[in-house]
Each structure stands twice: as C-alpha cells, then as structure tokens.
Amino acid sequence: MKLKAKVKKDVTKVKVMFKSPMAGPEEAEKKKIKPEFIAHIIGKANGKVVYEVSTSGFISKNPLFKFQFKGAKKGDMLEMTVTDNNGKVTSDSKKIK
Amino acid sequence: MERRNFLGFGVAAVAASMVPASLVAENFRETKPKMWQEATSAGAITDMYGTTDGIEGKIKLKAPKLAENGGSIPINIKTSVDLESIAIFQDANPRSAVAAFTVPEGAIINYDLRMKMRKTSDVTVIGKGRDGKMYKTVQKVEVSIGGCGG
C-alpha cells in the first residue's frame, strides 16, 4: 500500500494506492487465479473515521483512490485498513505532512 | 394469533429502521449483501435505497465521454450537498455495484477512483442526503476496448 497525505489550510488531501488484482469471479476464471478484490476500505485520522467505502471487483487493478477531509493537523496519524473478499485484513499508517 | 404476529412484525420493522442511524460507520458489504449481486443498476439501487428516483444536477460526476481503455476509467464525484452515503453503479459488467461510500459527518465529498467497464453504458451516481432526500447523476461512458477481462 502506498499512502500519501498532505494538509493545506485545514484540508487534508490523501492519495492511496493498493496492491490487488481486483479480480471478480468472472475475471479470475479467465485468468485462472483465485477471486481476489478489495471489499472494504476504511480511513481513520486520530481514531476518527474520515473515509469509508465498500467496493466490488469492478474497480481497476492496483486501484488508486483520492479523497479529502477536514480537521486533521500536520503530524497526525492517518490509518488505512483494507479488507479483501477472502477476509484478509491489511493496514498501514502514515504521518500527515 | 394473527394479531400477535402483526405486532411482532411491527416491532421488528421499527428496530430494523433504527439500526443504520445508530451506527457511526456502515459497511455496505455486510448490511446490504444483496446489492452486490444485482446485474442491473436499477435493481442494485433499489436494494440499497429502496428507490431509483433522485434530484438531478446536485452531484457532479466527472467521467470521460469516450474511454479508450475500459480497464481503467477515472471517475470523480463531487458535491456540496451533505450526504450520508453515495454509491456508483454501471450496467456494463456482470454485476452493477462498483463502490458505496459511507460519508462521515463533515467530510468533503470529492472522491477519485478508477473503475472497469466491459462495454459502453450509463454510469449512475446516487446518494442519500442527511435530510432524507435522494440525489443522482447519470452519464454515459463509451468504451472502445473493454476492460474487466472482456
């Protein structure tokens, strides 16, 4: 997971890129791999939820998401937690610049 | 007996309608498992919100009119309306739902992501406001080379 967060005038802009084949059942069958895609993403800053999305296999592979939120300061921690369709949980955190 | 059943049903319905409001964050994968299996936008939207109607023109959807590569179509959704949830649907793939956002209170709705589409179709973005009103935007995206392994 690649994570970048920058604060400017109270608005924090986040870019996050995940590593996942994002293959739904049909695509996985074609590529002869196990279906694997990100099902749920949650972003927290200082323990407060700032971003939450449930996704399907129709997001591009190695997906890039961008979002913005208010209320964080420089040096705060941003934590992203990702759950895939098989229930595997990955998380990563980074200081907001 | 019939009366007892009726009362029980009423209590269950009230309890069910109160659950989403009490949750701070909602995982649509768990709360609405049916919508992810629907083939059409209309079916999936009805599963999620119970209606496909919405006020148009309040949500800005930025998507290419002609996408050369259906495997990676950049989508941007932006609105100043205070929404509690917003979701993206299309009719090009075997199943319709792409992503469903739960919007935390006070968040800025300006989301970017990239999606896959097998063929030309409409992309629907629909959201529910904290005032209970529905908002939606529909745009047609033409795809010259299909993504999604197609």
Image (cartoon, coloured by chain):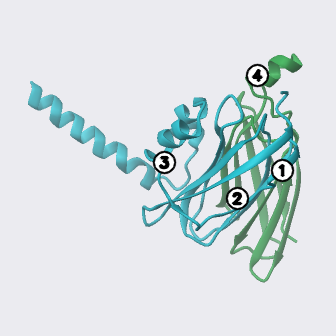
Q: Specify the amino acid type for callout 1.
A: Leu
Q: Say yes or no: labels 1 and 4 on the same chain.
A: no
Q: Colour of chain A?
A: green
Q: Say yes or no: labels 3 and 1 on the same chain.
A: yes
SS for tag 2?
Answer: strand
Q: Are marks 2 and 4 in contact (CB under 8 Å)?
A: no
**Among the 4 quarters of the image, the one containing residue B132:** bottom left
**B53 versus B44 height, above or below:** below
**B70 versus A50 height, above or below:** above
- Tag 3: Cα neighbours inside 10 Å, few (<14), some, or many (≥20)? some
- Marks 3 and 1 sit apart, C-alpha to C-alpha, by 25 Å
Read off the residue under disc 3: B52
Tell me which residue sits at (43%, 55%) in the image: B21
Residue B70 visible to an observer of this rendering: no
| Mark drawn on residue A44 | 2
Read off the residue under disc 1: B66
The numbered mark, 3 or 1, whose residue comes first in the sequence reads 3
Q: Say yes or no: labels 2 and 3 on the same chain.
A: no
Mark 3 falls within which chain? B
Q: Specify the amino acid type for callout 2.
A: Lys
Q: Specify the amino acid type for callout 3.
A: Thr
Judging by colour alone, the chain drawn in cyan in this rendered image is B
**Among the 4 quarters of the image, the one containing residue A51:** bottom right
- Tag 4: Cα neighbours inside 10 Å, few (<14), some, or many (≥20)? some
